Image: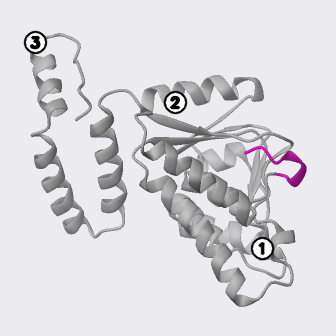
Amino acid sequence: MNRPEKRNALSLVHMRELIEAFSLVAGSEVAGVVLRAKGPVFSAGHDFRDMAGQDLFYMRKLLATCTELMTLIGEIPQVVVAQVHALATAAGAQLVASCDLAVASKAAGFAAPGGKGGWFCHTPMVAISHSIGRKRAAEMAFTGDVIDAITAAQWGLINYAVEPDELESATEDLLSRATRGSRYSKSFGKEILYRQMDLPIDKAYDLAVEAMASASQTQDAQEGMSAFLEKRSPKWQHR
């Protein structure tokens, strides 16, 4: 994101730009994506200049576009890692929570500030609450306070909090580890992982058993087993 003068606010235009970028990546053979930002803030959330005085029809369209962006990140076959160097608030924190993985500088912070104002952070809290759970989500939502990166890691909003000068290397390390292996296996794995998470445990196992049995018949699954038994490095066909 490169709108430093706007604190990388998620205007309708910018969200459409991000949707286009993620859609292009989804159709490529890229294994993973890093979402980073330029400027003093990772993202200040929605752009109030885009919203003040707008009617209900427009606001529904804007928030539907935001939901499309956040959902798309979870749906593309690639692993998406947020590299958070600074403050991420409201829909900016939602963006981090929507990424598969996240690494943040210890200089970063996260907040859902609507709770201390006049417009509650309803949509940001969908993604945030799925990451950190009920009580911690309620604290963020009701107080609007900024939590630091170490707390965000402890709560599960991000994976790691690192020193600012280690942020890029830590992100690259996590992405490298998260994208090794078969791209096909990873993309199918991402889909099933998220589908089973919100199911009752018996339904989750039903889905996972069928997915794992079906995946065992792919070329890469068979190659992985053969390579292990033959004590050699696998040669992935990514199918």
* Residue lying at 86% horizontally and 84% vertically, measured from the top left: 53
Q: Are marks 2 and 1 in contact (CB under 8 Å)?
A: no
- In the rendered structure, does residue 169 fall within the stretch colored magenta? no
Disc ID at residue 230? 3
Residue type pointed to by label 1: Gly
Residue 17 coordinates in the image, percent (x, y): 66, 54
* Residue lying at 76% horizontally and 49% vertically, measured from the top left: 109
Residue type pointed to by label 3: Glu
Disc ID at residue 114? 1
Circle 2: element type? helix
Distance between the Cα atoms at labels 1 and 3?
57 Å
Q: Can see residue 122? A: no
Up-down relation of residue 205 to residue 79 (above or below): below
> For mark 2, what is the residue?
174
- In the rendered structure, does residue 5 fall within the stretch colored magenta? yes
Range of residues picked out in magenta: 1-7
- Which one is earlier in the sequence, the residue at label 2 or at label 3? 2
Quadrant position of the C terminus in the picture: top left
Q: Residues within 10 Å of mark 2 (few under 14, many from 20)?
A: some
Residue 122 coordinates in the image, percent (x, y): 65, 77
Quadrant position of the N terminus in the picture: top right
